[in-house]
Amino acid sequence: MIDAEGFRANVGIVICNTQGQVFWAKRYGQHSWQYPQGGIDDGETPEQAMFRELHEEVGLRPEDVEIISVTKHWLRYKLPKRLIRKDSNPVCIGQKQKWFLLRLTCREEDVNLAVTTHPEFDNWRWVSYWYPVRQVVSFKRDVYRRVMKEFASHAMPFRASGGRQHRRKR
């Protein structure tokens, strides 16, 4: 769903563990890392889209997580000109996103990046809460900063100081 301004409706997903770390995923066959995210289909609510994307990208089901918070407003970013497909109709110039903060309630071994035949990610790891803001591709950085600031007070009970980053390959 692309709105009149050219922004595609999308959901973003931040998954926390009980140590206050967040799920950070490597895009399939690339060197870039990001949070799970995906488009909202016609007739789908943001929450329905989030659960669909959670399963498609991470292999988790609604019973594997608890929704802690949702961003109050839609957050937007524009795509760099080199990524805009000018031949598409309508032209998508960026994303408008509702973000969800989830707490993992299942075992981390239940994460499965290969649920679909075309996986989005080929690796993941737990990272410190603010790490993604510094590491995400530059055009998403402001949205990530705003999301993490909004979720910070809700994530506090799950945050721990320090802690190693743990890698998980699937």
Image (tube, grey):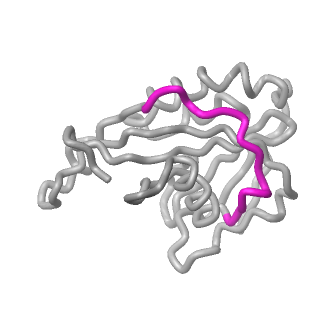
Quarter of the image with the C terminus is: bottom right
Q: Residue at x 59, y 45 (%)?
A: 13
Residue at the farthest bottom position: 117
Does the magenta segment cover residue 65? yes
Q: Residue at x 46, y 56 (%)?
A: 44
Callout count: 0
Residue at the farthest left position: 87
Q: Viewed as shown, does residue 122 lie left or right of 20?
A: left
Q: Position of residue 28 (x, y in %)?
A: 52, 65
Q: Viewed as shown, does residue 89 lie left or right of 137?
A: left
Q: Viewed as shown, does residue 74 lie left or right of 166?
A: left
Q: Residue at x 73, y 25 (%)?
A: 154
Q: Position of residue 69 (x, y in %)?
A: 66, 33
- Answer above or below: position of 88 versus 72: below
Q: Position of residue 158 (x, y in %)?
A: 83, 31
Q: Residue at x 51, y 47 (%)?
A: 46
Does the magenta segment cover residue 89? no
- Answer above or below: position of 89 versus 4: below
Q: Position of residue 2 (x, y in %)?
A: 27, 49
- Answer above or below: position of 12 versus 26: above
Res 156 → quadrant: top right
Pick the front one: 71 or 16? 71
Pick the front one: 142 or 67? 67
Report the span colored magenta: 59-74
